[in-house]
Amino acid sequence: MPKLETYKKQAKLLVRWHREGNFSIGGRIRQLARYRTLSDREALALKFPLTEAQEIIALEAGSASWAELKASTEAAQPNGEQPRTQDTAVASAKPVLYVADVDASAAFYRDQLGFRIDFLHGNPPFYGSVSRDGATLHLKLVHEPVFAAGAAEREGLIMAFVDMPNVRELYAEYRAADAEIVQKLTKQAWGGTDFIVRDPDGNAITFVG
């Protein structure tokens, strides 16, 4: 768990971004139930004290309140210390997919591939996140294709690689959902079994077990 000082810095950064008019924090402010219906512009017009920023950071860290986060952090770090290796440990990696419409892309991953929508930033959204179990994909708006026409298909580019304990069951699920499967379930020479799904923006996602 990060040090309490790290969470304090994150909260102060949120306040600074709000003061600077950074629209990217609108989605984070809407995590507070009382602000759920606000637009980005309305969120930036709010009075936004440090206590509310701390409340958001606590929610994002999985705690019900800043006091709970503070108590759990301090309990996990007796005498204010923590293992040196924790500061440099890599927790996870999240592939970023380039899409033409973040809202539509998030709906595709939710409705066809069984992901949940974690957040959408912006109104309309310019960045978002979807996840299913331990896999998370980020979605970034681009106004023109990142690759030359046909390059992704021609080069067989894979945008994300998702490990699955039950790849055969997932394959059957996606076939039933009429997802665009561009490589059927295949036993590979290196020992894995995988299949590839393509999203509406041409991003190829490999699911492997």
Image (cartoon, helix red, strand yellow):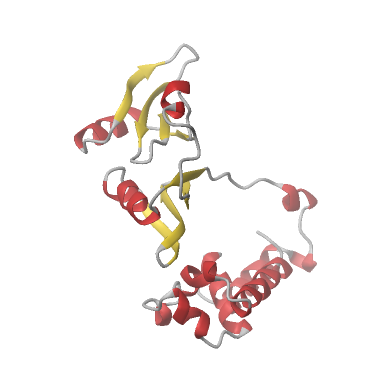
Which residue occupies 52% across, 80% down?
44
**Quadrant (top left/top right/bottom left/bottom right) for the C terminus:** top left
Circle count: 0
Spot occupied by residue 82 in the image (x, y as percentages of width and height): 76, 58
Q: Is residue 142 left or right of residue 52?
A: left
The answer to whether 108 is drawn above or below residue 28 in the figure is above
Instruction: Give whichever of 171, 165 is nearer the camera.
Output: 171
Instruction: Give whichever of 81, 42 is nearer the camera.
Output: 42
Which residue occupies 58% across, 45% down?
92
Which residue occupies 60% across, 83% down?
51
User: Picture quarter containing residue 113?
Assistant: top left
Spot occupied by residue 36 in the image (x, y as percentages of width and height): 39, 76
Q: Is residue 26 left or right of residue 177?
A: right
For the question of whether residue 91 can be seen, the reply is: yes
**Quadrant (top left/top right/bottom left/bottom right) for the N terminus:** bottom right
Spot occupied by residue 143 in the image (x, y as percentages of width and height): 46, 50
Which residue is situated farthest in the bottom direction here?
47
Spot occupied by residue 192 in the image (x, y as percentages of width and height): 45, 20
For the question of whether residue 164 can be seen, the reply is: no
Q: Is residue 191 left or right of residue 178?
A: right
